[in-house]
Image (cartoon, rainbow, N blue to C red):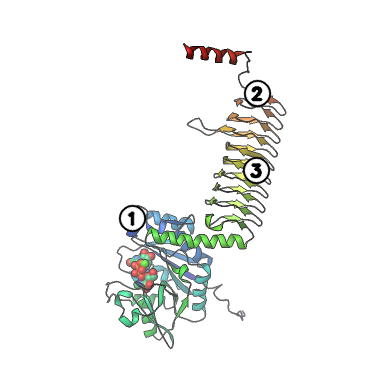
Protein backbone atom coordinates (compact mmCIF):
# COMPACT_ATOMS: atom_id res chain seq x y z
CA UNK A 1 0.00 0.00 0.00
CA UNK A 2 1.34 3.41 -0.96
CA UNK A 3 0.65 6.37 1.27
CA UNK A 4 -0.82 9.41 -0.45
CA UNK A 5 1.96 11.85 -1.12
CA UNK A 6 -0.01 14.99 -0.56
CA UNK A 7 -1.68 14.55 2.79
CA UNK A 8 -5.23 15.86 2.56
CA UNK A 9 -5.68 18.84 4.89
CA UNK A 10 -8.21 16.99 6.99
CA UNK A 11 -10.36 15.19 4.47
CA UNK A 12 -9.80 11.58 5.46
CA UNK A 13 -9.24 12.28 9.14
CA UNK A 14 -11.85 11.42 11.71
CA UNK A 15 -13.20 14.34 13.68
CA UNK A 16 -15.14 14.43 16.91
CA UNK A 17 -17.15 17.62 17.36
CA UNK A 18 -18.33 18.44 20.87
CA UNK A 19 -21.07 21.06 20.96
CA UNK A 20 -21.65 22.68 24.33
CA UNK A 21 -25.34 23.40 24.70
CA UNK A 22 -25.86 23.24 28.45
CA UNK A 23 -26.22 26.99 28.76
CA UNK A 24 -28.67 28.49 31.23
CA UNK A 25 -29.72 31.27 28.90
CA UNK A 26 -31.54 33.15 31.64
CA UNK A 27 -30.85 36.47 29.94
CA UNK A 28 -33.07 35.47 27.04
CA UNK A 29 -36.07 35.74 29.45
CA UNK A 30 -37.65 32.83 27.63
CA UNK A 31 -39.43 29.52 28.17
CA UNK A 32 -37.39 28.20 25.25
CA UNK A 33 -33.79 27.13 25.92
CA UNK A 34 -31.36 29.65 24.49
CA UNK A 35 -29.81 27.36 21.88
CA UNK A 36 -33.23 26.60 20.37
CA UNK A 37 -33.86 30.23 19.48
CA UNK A 38 -33.72 30.58 15.72
CA UNK A 39 -31.64 32.59 13.31
CA UNK A 40 -32.79 32.60 9.69
CA UNK A 41 -35.34 29.93 10.52
CA UNK A 42 -32.94 27.45 12.11
CA UNK A 43 -32.00 27.01 15.75
CA UNK A 44 -28.61 28.25 16.88
CA UNK A 45 -27.80 24.66 17.80
CA UNK A 46 -28.78 23.57 14.29
CA UNK A 47 -26.46 26.16 12.75
CA UNK A 48 -23.53 25.06 14.89
CA UNK A 49 -24.01 21.37 14.12
CA UNK A 50 -24.51 21.98 10.40
CA UNK A 51 -21.30 24.01 10.11
CA UNK A 52 -19.35 21.32 11.97
CA UNK A 53 -20.72 18.50 9.83
CA UNK A 54 -19.95 20.61 6.75
CA UNK A 55 -16.34 20.83 7.95
CA UNK A 56 -16.15 17.05 8.10
CA UNK A 57 -17.09 16.19 11.67
CA UNK A 58 -17.67 12.45 11.57
CA UNK A 59 -18.99 12.24 15.13
CA UNK A 60 -21.00 14.87 16.94
CA UNK A 61 -21.62 14.87 20.68
CA UNK A 62 -24.00 17.48 22.05
CA UNK A 63 -23.66 18.31 25.73
CA UNK A 64 -27.03 19.30 27.16
CA UNK A 65 -28.26 20.29 30.61
CA UNK A 66 -30.42 17.96 32.69
CA UNK A 67 -33.98 17.37 31.44
CA UNK A 68 -33.43 18.90 28.04
CA UNK A 69 -35.22 16.46 25.78
CA UNK A 70 -36.14 19.39 23.53
CA UNK A 71 -32.50 20.28 22.91
CA UNK A 72 -31.65 16.62 22.30
CA UNK A 73 -34.51 16.34 19.81
CA UNK A 74 -33.33 19.33 17.82
CA UNK A 75 -29.76 17.98 17.76
CA UNK A 76 -31.00 14.67 16.36
CA UNK A 77 -33.26 16.41 13.85
CA UNK A 78 -30.21 18.27 12.54
CA UNK A 79 -27.83 15.32 12.54
CA UNK A 80 -29.37 11.89 13.05
CA UNK A 81 -26.11 10.34 14.25
CA UNK A 82 -25.54 12.94 16.97
CA UNK A 83 -24.95 11.57 20.45
CA UNK A 84 -26.43 13.34 23.43
CA UNK A 85 -24.68 13.51 26.78
CA UNK A 86 -25.85 15.31 29.89
CA UNK A 87 -23.80 17.68 32.01
CA UNK A 88 -25.55 17.33 35.35
CA UNK A 89 -23.88 20.29 37.07
CA UNK A 90 -22.71 23.40 35.32
CA UNK A 91 -19.12 23.50 36.52
CA UNK A 92 -17.44 25.09 33.51
CA UNK A 93 -16.61 24.55 29.87
CA UNK A 94 -13.90 21.93 30.46
CA UNK A 95 -16.25 20.02 32.76
CA UNK A 96 -18.87 20.14 30.01
CA UNK A 97 -16.39 18.72 27.48
CA UNK A 98 -15.61 15.84 29.85
CA UNK A 99 -19.27 14.82 29.72
CA UNK A 100 -18.21 13.51 26.31
CA UNK A 101 -15.42 11.44 27.88
CA UNK A 102 -16.51 8.18 26.25
CA UNK A 103 -16.37 9.69 22.79
CA UNK A 104 -13.03 11.31 23.59
CA UNK A 105 -11.65 7.86 24.41
CA UNK A 106 -12.50 6.56 20.94
CA UNK A 107 -9.34 8.11 19.52
CA UNK A 108 -10.34 10.52 16.77
CA UNK A 109 -7.73 12.34 14.73
CA UNK A 110 -8.99 15.71 15.87
CA UNK A 111 -11.48 17.10 18.33
CA UNK A 112 -13.34 20.37 17.81
CA UNK A 113 -15.22 22.04 20.65
CA UNK A 114 -17.90 24.54 19.67
CA UNK A 115 -20.52 26.55 21.58
CA UNK A 116 -24.14 26.23 20.50
CA UNK A 117 -24.68 29.89 21.35
CA UNK A 118 -22.08 30.96 18.78
CA UNK A 119 -24.17 30.24 15.70
CA UNK A 120 -22.38 32.23 13.00
CA UNK A 121 -19.25 30.13 12.86
CA UNK A 122 -18.67 29.03 9.30
CA UNK A 123 -17.70 25.70 7.87
CA UNK A 124 -14.58 27.43 6.51
CA UNK A 125 -13.39 28.44 9.97
CA UNK A 126 -14.05 24.99 11.43
CA UNK A 127 -12.19 23.51 8.47
CA UNK A 128 -9.30 25.92 9.15
CA UNK A 129 -9.17 24.74 12.77
CA UNK A 130 -9.04 21.13 11.65
CA UNK A 131 -6.36 21.85 9.08
CA UNK A 132 -4.15 23.37 11.78
CA UNK A 133 -4.44 20.19 13.86
CA UNK A 134 -3.81 18.07 10.76
CA UNK A 135 -0.56 19.95 10.18
CA UNK A 136 0.74 19.26 13.68
CA UNK A 137 -0.60 21.91 16.06
CA UNK A 138 -1.83 20.26 19.26
CA UNK A 139 -4.24 22.93 20.50
CA UNK A 140 -5.79 25.57 18.27
CA UNK A 141 -7.91 28.37 19.71
CA UNK A 142 -9.95 30.83 17.68
CA UNK A 143 -9.23 34.47 18.42
CA UNK A 144 -10.61 37.78 17.26
CA UNK A 145 -9.84 41.45 17.72
CA UNK A 146 -12.70 42.62 19.90
CA UNK A 147 -14.08 46.12 19.52
CA UNK A 148 -14.77 45.88 23.27
CA UNK A 149 -12.80 43.06 24.94
CA UNK A 150 -14.55 43.35 28.32
CA UNK A 151 -15.66 39.95 29.59
CA UNK A 152 -13.74 37.85 27.08
CA UNK A 153 -10.77 35.61 27.76
CA UNK A 154 -7.53 37.28 26.58
CA UNK A 155 -4.96 35.50 24.44
CA UNK A 156 -1.39 35.79 25.64
CA UNK A 157 1.06 35.21 22.79
CA UNK A 158 4.74 34.33 23.09
CA UNK A 159 7.55 33.47 20.70
CA UNK A 160 6.21 29.96 20.14
CA UNK A 161 2.59 30.84 19.59
CA UNK A 162 -0.22 30.91 22.11
CA UNK A 163 1.06 30.82 25.67
CA UNK A 164 -2.19 31.01 27.61
CA UNK A 165 -5.76 32.24 27.64
CA UNK A 166 -6.63 34.24 30.73
CA UNK A 167 -10.27 34.76 31.64
CA UNK A 168 -11.29 38.40 32.10
CA UNK A 169 -12.05 37.86 35.79
CA UNK A 170 -8.62 36.35 36.39
CA UNK A 171 -6.66 38.77 34.21
CA UNK A 172 -4.11 41.28 35.44
CA UNK A 173 -4.34 44.93 34.39
CA UNK A 174 -1.68 44.32 31.71
CA UNK A 175 -3.52 41.27 30.39
CA UNK A 176 -6.77 43.19 30.22
CA UNK A 177 -5.07 45.57 27.78
CA UNK A 178 -4.71 42.74 25.26
CA UNK A 179 -7.15 43.21 22.38
CA UNK A 180 -6.89 39.64 21.05
CA UNK A 181 -9.80 37.77 22.60
CA UNK A 182 -10.78 34.13 22.82
CA UNK A 183 -13.84 33.18 20.80
CA UNK A 184 -14.19 30.05 22.93
CA UNK A 185 -13.83 27.50 20.14
CA UNK A 186 -11.02 25.03 20.42
CA UNK A 187 -9.56 22.25 18.33
CA UNK A 188 -7.26 19.63 19.84
CA UNK A 189 -5.21 16.77 18.59
CA UNK A 190 -7.28 13.66 19.23
CA UNK A 191 -4.32 11.85 20.73
CA UNK A 192 -3.91 14.42 23.48
CA UNK A 193 -7.38 15.87 23.96
CA UNK A 194 -8.61 13.73 26.84
CA UNK A 195 -5.30 13.88 28.69
CA UNK A 196 -5.14 17.68 28.40
CA UNK A 197 -8.73 18.35 29.38
CA UNK A 198 -8.64 15.88 32.29
CA UNK A 199 -5.84 17.95 33.81
CA UNK A 200 -7.92 21.15 33.98
CA UNK A 201 -8.55 22.28 37.54
CA UNK A 202 -10.83 24.94 39.00
CA UNK A 203 -8.39 27.10 40.90
CA UNK A 204 -9.63 30.46 39.59
CA UNK A 205 -11.88 33.42 40.32
CA UNK A 206 -15.06 31.61 39.22
CA UNK A 207 -14.19 28.16 40.67
CA UNK A 208 -14.95 26.80 37.19
CA UNK A 209 -13.20 24.20 35.08
CA UNK A 210 -12.05 26.40 32.21
CA UNK A 211 -11.60 24.80 28.81
CA UNK A 212 -9.26 27.67 28.05
CA UNK A 213 -6.74 26.20 30.50
CA UNK A 214 -6.10 23.53 27.86
CA UNK A 215 -3.68 25.98 26.25
CA UNK A 216 -1.46 26.46 29.29
CA UNK A 217 -1.58 22.73 30.08
CA UNK A 218 -0.61 21.73 26.55
CA UNK A 219 2.31 24.13 26.57
CA UNK A 220 3.42 22.77 29.94
CA UNK A 221 3.47 19.30 28.40
CA UNK A 222 5.75 20.56 25.63
CA UNK A 223 2.93 20.57 23.05
CA UNK A 224 2.14 23.42 20.65
CA UNK A 225 -0.74 25.89 20.81
CA UNK A 226 -1.68 28.40 18.11
CA UNK A 227 -4.36 30.97 17.33
CA UNK A 228 -6.59 31.14 14.28
CA UNK A 229 -7.98 34.63 13.78
CA UNK A 230 -11.64 34.85 12.75
CA UNK A 231 -13.74 37.91 11.94
CA UNK A 232 -15.53 39.25 15.02
CA UNK A 233 -18.97 38.96 13.44
CA UNK A 234 -18.43 35.23 13.00
CA UNK A 235 -17.64 34.52 16.63
CA UNK A 236 -20.28 36.72 18.24
CA UNK A 237 -22.09 34.89 20.99
CA UNK A 238 -25.76 35.24 21.81
CA UNK A 239 -26.77 35.77 25.42
CA UNK A 240 -29.87 37.98 25.11
CA UNK A 241 -32.43 39.05 22.51
CA UNK A 242 -30.43 42.11 21.50
CA UNK A 243 -27.48 39.89 20.59
CA UNK A 244 -29.90 37.47 18.92
CA UNK A 245 -31.10 40.29 16.67
CA UNK A 246 -27.51 41.31 15.94
CA UNK A 247 -26.61 37.74 14.98
CA UNK A 248 -29.72 37.57 12.81
CA UNK A 249 -28.65 40.75 11.01
CA UNK A 250 -25.20 39.30 10.34
CA UNK A 251 -26.74 36.10 9.02
CA UNK A 252 -29.22 37.97 6.83
CA UNK A 253 -26.43 39.99 5.26
CA UNK A 254 -24.57 36.77 4.47
CA UNK A 255 -27.64 35.19 2.89
CA UNK A 256 -28.48 38.29 0.83
CA UNK A 257 -24.92 38.63 -0.40
CA UNK A 258 -24.89 34.93 -1.35
CA UNK A 259 -28.17 35.28 -3.27
CA UNK A 260 -26.87 38.30 -5.17
CA UNK A 261 -23.52 36.67 -5.88
CA UNK A 262 -25.44 33.69 -7.29
CA UNK A 263 -27.19 35.98 -9.77
CA UNK A 264 -30.36 37.27 -8.13
CA UNK A 265 -31.25 40.96 -8.09
CA UNK A 266 -32.50 42.26 -4.75
CA UNK A 267 -33.83 45.76 -5.32
CA UNK A 268 -33.60 46.64 -1.62
CA UNK A 269 -31.53 43.85 -0.06
CA UNK A 270 -31.82 45.11 3.49
CA UNK A 271 -35.62 44.65 3.36
CA UNK A 272 -35.57 41.02 2.20
CA UNK A 273 -35.62 38.30 4.87
CA UNK A 274 -34.17 34.91 3.97
CA UNK A 275 -34.22 31.55 5.68
CA UNK A 276 -31.05 29.50 5.95
CA UNK A 277 -32.29 27.16 3.22
CA UNK A 278 -33.82 29.62 0.72
CA UNK A 279 -32.80 28.76 -2.82
CA UNK A 280 -32.92 31.57 -5.36
CA UNK A 281 -31.99 31.03 -9.00
CA UNK A 282 -30.26 33.23 -11.56
CA UNK A 283 -31.88 36.39 -12.82
CA UNK A 284 -34.56 36.21 -10.20
CA UNK A 285 -35.78 39.65 -9.19
CA UNK A 286 -36.89 40.21 -5.62
CA UNK A 287 -38.63 43.49 -4.94
CA UNK A 288 -38.60 45.18 -1.52
CA UNK A 289 -40.13 43.76 1.66
CA UNK A 290 -40.27 40.08 0.86
CA UNK A 291 -40.17 37.37 3.55
CA UNK A 292 -38.86 33.90 2.79
CA UNK A 293 -39.77 31.36 5.47
CA UNK A 294 -38.12 27.96 5.41
CA UNK A 295 -38.25 25.61 2.44
CA UNK A 296 -38.59 28.03 -0.46
CA UNK A 297 -37.13 27.41 -3.91
CA UNK A 298 -37.35 30.10 -6.59
CA UNK A 299 -36.27 29.03 -10.07
CA UNK A 300 -34.44 31.19 -12.60
CA UNK A 301 -36.00 34.39 -13.95
CA UNK A 302 -38.96 34.39 -11.60
CA UNK A 303 -40.07 37.71 -10.12
CA UNK A 304 -41.17 38.13 -6.52
CA UNK A 305 -42.98 41.44 -6.31
CA UNK A 306 -43.02 43.64 -3.24
CA UNK A 307 -44.48 42.69 0.13
CA UNK A 308 -44.93 38.98 -0.47
CA UNK A 309 -44.64 36.20 2.12
CA UNK A 310 -43.43 32.76 1.05
CA UNK A 311 -42.92 29.58 3.04
CA UNK A 312 -42.44 25.96 1.93
CA UNK A 313 -43.13 27.00 -1.65
CA UNK A 314 -41.69 26.26 -5.07
CA UNK A 315 -41.78 29.00 -7.69
CA UNK A 316 -41.09 27.83 -11.22
CA UNK A 317 -39.03 29.50 -13.94
CA UNK A 318 -40.32 32.88 -15.08
CA UNK A 319 -43.24 32.68 -12.67
CA UNK A 320 -44.46 35.85 -11.02
CA UNK A 321 -45.61 36.31 -7.44
CA UNK A 322 -47.26 39.31 -5.80
CA UNK A 323 -47.21 42.12 -4.95
CA UNK A 324 -48.85 41.25 -1.62
CA UNK A 325 -49.08 37.51 -2.25
CA UNK A 326 -48.83 34.72 0.28
CA UNK A 327 -47.46 31.31 -0.69
CA UNK A 328 -47.94 28.82 2.12
CA UNK A 329 -46.39 25.34 2.45
CA UNK A 330 -47.07 23.13 -0.54
CA UNK A 331 -47.59 25.97 -3.01
CA UNK A 332 -46.02 24.81 -6.27
CA UNK A 333 -46.02 27.24 -9.18
CA UNK A 334 -45.19 25.96 -12.63
CA UNK A 335 -43.22 27.80 -15.26
CA UNK A 336 -44.65 31.24 -16.09
CA UNK A 337 -47.48 30.80 -13.60
CA UNK A 338 -48.79 33.99 -12.08
CA UNK A 339 -50.00 34.65 -8.56
CA UNK A 340 -51.10 38.25 -8.21
CA UNK A 341 -52.00 40.65 -5.44
CA UNK A 342 -53.87 39.54 -2.33
CA UNK A 343 -53.79 35.89 -3.34
CA UNK A 344 -53.08 33.04 -0.91
CA UNK A 345 -51.97 29.64 -2.19
CA UNK A 346 -51.64 26.62 0.12
CA UNK A 347 -50.88 22.98 -0.76
CA UNK A 348 -51.80 23.68 -4.35
CA UNK A 349 -50.05 23.33 -7.67
CA UNK A 350 -50.40 25.71 -10.59
CA UNK A 351 -49.56 24.32 -14.01
CA UNK A 352 -47.49 26.08 -16.65
CA UNK A 353 -48.84 29.55 -17.30
CA UNK A 354 -51.81 29.22 -14.95
CA UNK A 355 -52.99 32.53 -13.54
CA UNK A 356 -54.54 33.49 -10.22
CA UNK A 357 -54.23 37.22 -10.52
CA UNK A 358 -56.30 38.85 -7.80
CA UNK A 359 -57.87 38.36 -4.38
CA UNK A 360 -58.16 34.57 -4.24
CA UNK A 361 -57.63 31.66 -1.88
CA UNK A 362 -56.53 28.43 -3.57
CA UNK A 363 -55.90 25.64 -1.05
CA UNK A 364 -55.61 21.85 -1.40
CA UNK A 365 -55.97 22.12 -5.14
CA UNK A 366 -54.38 21.50 -8.47
CA UNK A 367 -54.81 23.99 -11.26
CA UNK A 368 -53.99 22.81 -14.77
CA UNK A 369 -51.72 24.52 -17.25
CA UNK A 370 -53.10 27.70 -18.76
CA UNK A 371 -56.13 27.81 -16.48
CA UNK A 372 -57.37 31.25 -15.44
CA UNK A 373 -58.81 31.77 -12.00
CA UNK A 374 -60.85 34.96 -11.80
CA UNK A 375 -60.63 37.58 -9.08
CA UNK A 376 -62.09 36.58 -5.75
CA UNK A 377 -62.27 32.85 -6.42
CA UNK A 378 -62.21 30.79 -3.24
CA UNK A 379 -61.66 27.07 -2.83
CA UNK A 380 -63.89 26.07 0.07
CA UNK A 381 -61.62 23.29 1.25
CA UNK A 382 -62.62 22.88 4.89
CA UNK A 383 -65.87 21.91 6.58
CA UNK A 384 -64.61 22.44 10.09
CA UNK A 385 -63.38 18.85 10.36
CA UNK A 386 -61.61 17.72 7.20
CA UNK A 387 -59.85 19.20 4.20
CA UNK A 388 -60.97 18.40 0.65
CA UNK A 389 -59.35 18.83 -2.74
CA UNK A 390 -60.31 20.92 -5.74
CA UNK A 391 -59.11 19.84 -9.16
CA UNK A 392 -59.16 22.33 -12.01
CA UNK A 393 -58.22 21.04 -15.44
CA UNK A 394 -56.00 22.54 -18.10
CA UNK A 395 -57.29 25.65 -19.76
CA UNK A 396 -60.32 25.95 -17.49
CA UNK A 397 -61.71 29.43 -16.87
CA UNK A 398 -63.22 30.20 -13.50
CA UNK A 399 -65.23 33.44 -13.43
CA UNK A 400 -64.74 36.02 -10.71
CA UNK A 401 -66.17 35.59 -7.24
CA UNK A 402 -66.80 31.88 -7.56
CA UNK A 403 -66.84 29.51 -4.61
CA UNK A 404 -65.52 26.03 -5.39
CA UNK A 405 -66.91 23.72 -2.72
CA UNK A 406 -64.47 20.80 -2.42
CA UNK A 407 -64.26 17.98 -3.13
CA UNK A 408 -64.96 19.10 -6.66
CA UNK A 409 -63.48 18.79 -10.14
CA UNK A 410 -63.70 21.31 -12.93
CA UNK A 411 -62.54 19.44 -15.99
CA UNK A 412 -60.26 20.74 -18.72
CA UNK A 413 -61.50 23.63 -20.78
CA UNK A 414 -64.67 24.18 -18.75
CA UNK A 415 -66.05 27.61 -17.88
CA UNK A 416 -67.54 28.62 -14.56
CA UNK A 417 -69.77 31.68 -14.65
CA UNK A 418 -68.97 34.54 -12.31
CA UNK A 419 -70.44 34.27 -8.85
CA UNK A 420 -71.15 30.56 -9.14
CA UNK A 421 -71.10 28.34 -6.08
CA UNK A 422 -69.74 25.13 -7.62
CA UNK A 423 -70.92 22.11 -5.63
CA UNK A 424 -70.96 19.50 -8.41
CA UNK A 425 -68.23 18.40 -10.81
CA UNK A 426 -68.12 20.29 -14.10
CA UNK A 427 -67.51 18.35 -17.33
CA UNK A 428 -64.82 19.19 -19.83
CA UNK A 429 -65.65 22.15 -22.05
CA UNK A 430 -69.02 22.71 -20.31
CA UNK A 431 -70.28 25.92 -18.71
CA UNK A 432 -71.45 25.79 -15.11
CA UNK A 433 -73.47 28.67 -13.78
CA UNK A 434 -75.12 28.53 -10.39
CA UNK A 435 -76.54 31.84 -9.30
CA UNK A 436 -79.93 33.48 -8.96
CA UNK A 437 -81.23 34.74 -12.28
CA UNK A 438 -81.20 38.49 -12.66
CA UNK A 439 -84.63 40.18 -12.86
CA UNK A 440 -85.32 43.68 -14.12
CA UNK A 441 -88.21 45.92 -13.02
CA UNK A 442 -88.61 48.77 -15.47
CA UNK A 443 -88.87 52.24 -13.91
CA UNK A 444 -88.41 50.94 -10.38
CA UNK A 445 -85.64 53.39 -9.49
CA UNK A 446 -87.45 56.57 -10.47
CA UNK A 447 -90.59 55.44 -8.61
CA UNK A 448 -88.45 54.67 -5.55
CA UNK A 449 -86.81 58.10 -5.59
CA UNK A 450 -90.20 59.85 -6.01
CA UNK A 451 -91.63 57.96 -3.03
CA UNK A 452 -88.66 58.89 -0.85
CA UNK A 453 -88.80 62.56 -1.89
CA UNK A 454 -92.52 62.91 -1.03
CA UNK A 455 -92.11 61.23 2.38
CA UNK A 456 -89.30 63.68 3.23
CA UNK A 457 -91.53 66.69 2.45
CA UNK A 458 -94.37 65.39 4.57
C1 LIG B 1 -16.02 31.60 27.26
C2 LIG B 1 -14.50 31.46 27.32
C3 LIG B 1 -13.87 32.83 27.11
C4 LIG B 1 -14.33 33.41 25.80
C5 LIG B 1 -15.85 33.46 25.73
C6 LIG B 1 -16.30 33.83 24.35
C7 LIG B 1 -14.08 29.62 28.89
C8 LIG B 1 -13.63 29.27 30.24
N1 LIG B 1 -14.11 30.92 28.62
O1 LIG B 1 -16.38 32.42 28.36
O2 LIG B 1 -12.46 32.73 27.11
O3 LIG B 1 -13.80 34.72 25.61
O4 LIG B 1 -16.41 32.16 26.01
O5 LIG B 1 -17.68 34.02 24.31
O6 LIG B 1 -14.34 28.75 28.08
N2 LIG B 1 -21.24 25.76 29.00
C9 LIG B 1 -21.67 24.49 29.34
N3 LIG B 1 -21.43 24.03 30.59
C10 LIG B 1 -20.78 24.75 31.52
C11 LIG B 1 -20.34 26.04 31.19
C12 LIG B 1 -20.59 26.51 29.90
O7 LIG B 1 -22.26 23.82 28.50
O8 LIG B 1 -20.60 24.24 32.64
C13 LIG B 1 -21.47 26.26 27.65
C14 LIG B 1 -22.40 27.47 27.64
O9 LIG B 1 -23.73 27.07 27.41
C15 LIG B 1 -21.90 28.27 26.47
C16 LIG B 1 -20.42 27.94 26.42
O10 LIG B 1 -20.25 26.72 27.11
O11 LIG B 1 -22.48 27.85 25.27
C17 LIG B 1 -19.55 29.04 27.01
O12 LIG B 1 -19.82 29.18 28.38
P1 LIG B 1 -19.89 30.59 29.08
O13 LIG B 1 -20.12 30.39 30.53
O14 LIG B 1 -20.82 31.47 28.34
O15 LIG B 1 -18.39 31.10 28.87
P2 LIG B 1 -17.88 32.58 28.90
O16 LIG B 1 -17.77 33.05 30.30
O17 LIG B 1 -18.67 33.39 27.95
CA1 LIG C 1 -20.68 33.22 26.83
> Residue 220 location, x and y as percent?
36, 85
Query: What residue is shown with label 2?
Result: 433
Ligand 1 within 8 Å of disc 2? The answer is no
Query: What residue is shown with label 3?
Result: 338
Q: Residues within 10 Å of mark 2 (few under 14, many from 20)?
A: some
Query: What residue is shown with label 1?
Result: 29
Residue 412 visible in the snapshot: yes
Please identify the residue farthest to the bottom as the structure is shown.
159
Residue 99 visible in the snapshot: no
Helix, strand or loop at label 1? It is: loop
> Nearer the N terminus, badge 2 or badge 3?
3
Residue drawn at point x = 62 percent, y = 42 percent: 339
Q: Quadrant of residue 152?
A: bottom left
> Residue 123 location, x and y as percent?
52, 67
- Viewed as shown, does residue 360 lie left or right of 232? right
Helix, strand or loop at label 3? It is: strand
> Nearer the N terminus, badge 1 or badge 2?
1
Helix, strand or loop at label 2? It is: loop
Amino acid sequence: MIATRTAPASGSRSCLAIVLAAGEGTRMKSDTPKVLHAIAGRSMLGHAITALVGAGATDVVVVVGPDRADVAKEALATFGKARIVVQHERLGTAHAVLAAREALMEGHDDVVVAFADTPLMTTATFAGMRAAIASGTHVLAVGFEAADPTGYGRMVLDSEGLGAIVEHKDASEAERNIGLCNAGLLALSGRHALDIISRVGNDNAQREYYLTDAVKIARGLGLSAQVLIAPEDEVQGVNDRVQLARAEATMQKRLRDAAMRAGATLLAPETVYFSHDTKIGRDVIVEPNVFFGTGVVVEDQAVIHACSHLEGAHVGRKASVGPFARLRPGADLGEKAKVGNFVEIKAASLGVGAKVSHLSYIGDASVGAGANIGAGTITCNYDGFSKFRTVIGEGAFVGSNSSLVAPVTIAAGAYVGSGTVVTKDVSADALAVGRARQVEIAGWASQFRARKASSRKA
